[in-house]
Amino acid sequence: MIGDTETIDEFLAHRTSDVEEAVRTAAATEIMPRFRSLATHEIDEKSGPHDLVTDADRKAEAYLTEALAKLLPGSVVVGEEAVHANPATYDAIRGEAPVWIVDPVDGTRQFVHGDPGFCTLVALTQGGVVHASWTYAPVHDRFATAIRGRGAFLDGSRLHSGSPAAGRDLEVATSHPYYTTDEQKRALLGLQTKGVRPRSCGSAGLEYLQIAQGLLDATAFCWEAAWDHAAGLLLVEEAGGSQLTVAGEPFRITGGNALPFTAARDEATARRVVELLTRGT
């Protein structure tokens, strides 16, 4: 429960700006001062050389964990770095309490290399349902928000994903080969066809934002980590887009999905991408 009587809807009716302020503060105090200024000892590998973590990730997540839990009594925080330290932390997403899902630096590889293509992602969920999301690209100071049933916005302007123009190749951002199995690589080969232009993705959060803006047609992703997808999927849905797994079912942040899955500007595009992914297997 949230306090004694307050529901998530009631919380979102008057505290969304406080969440935005917490995200902006985490970026201003813990992320941006380290951008293009990281020392070697501030960068570590997790599972391997393509899975990096920095002091910016750790400190921004620590700040958000404290700030968000205070904003919403009774909530818990599931952050990428906390789950790396203790995988059991992830189980809270499947529980009954409100859960903040946090990716402090989505696009750590880009961040480490001085590329501005990274963002901070926060989603508020309960019972596996994403109720609100916040996506902040601090280098460009662009902030996107979505509340279930109330639309998606970028810097205060409503987002509409629209539909791809007839006759134009579909641009699809896909999981990088470093992070795919042989079976998933075969599925992604289905996108190597006339009328489709696949490319490796950057920050997942920023790819979702591009779909919501109508600047990218679809994704084809092969991993389930909720901190990469929860915020962006709601943003796309509230902008009018659609999402689907290769099993023909919506992606579940609680896990157990058939992969790959897609998010797209509209339902027809999502179904087209899934058809091609299925053909590739």
Image (tube, rainbow, N blue to C red):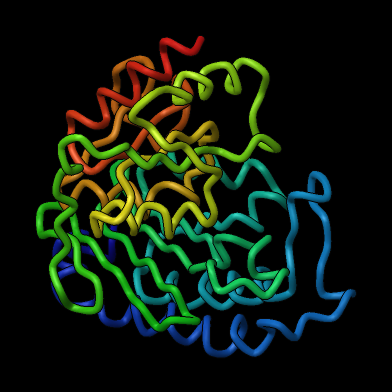
Q: Nearer the viewer, residue 50 or 134?
A: 50
In percent of the image, x 10 and y 59: which residue is there?
150
Seen in the picture, residue 65 relative to 260 is either above or below; the reply is below
* Residue 5 in view (yes/no): no
Q: Is residue 164 above or below residue 204?
A: above
Examine the rendered structure and indicate whether residue 255 appears above or below residue 216.
Answer: above
Query: Does 168 sit left or right of 228 as displayed?
Result: left
What residue appears at the point 62 percent right and 84 percent down from the top-left corner?
A: 30
Q: Quadrant of residue 115?
A: bottom right
Q: Is residue 186 left or right of residue 156?
A: right
Looking at the image, which residue is at 41% across and 53% down? Answer: 207
Residue at image location 31% in from the left, 61% down from the top: 133
| Residue farthest right in this picture | 41
Question: Which quadrant of the rendered structure holds the N terminus?
Answer: bottom left
Of 95 and 152, nearer the camera is: 152
Percent across and percent down for residue 120 are 48, 68
Farthest-out residue, left: 150
User: How many marks can you see?
Assistant: 0
Asked if residue 46 shows in the view, the reply is: yes
Task: Give the image location of residue 201, x and y in percent.
Answer: 52, 48
Residue 227: percent from left, percent from top: 49, 51
Which image quadrant for residue 257?
A: top left
Q: Does residue 44 appear to the left or right of 66 in the view shown?
A: right
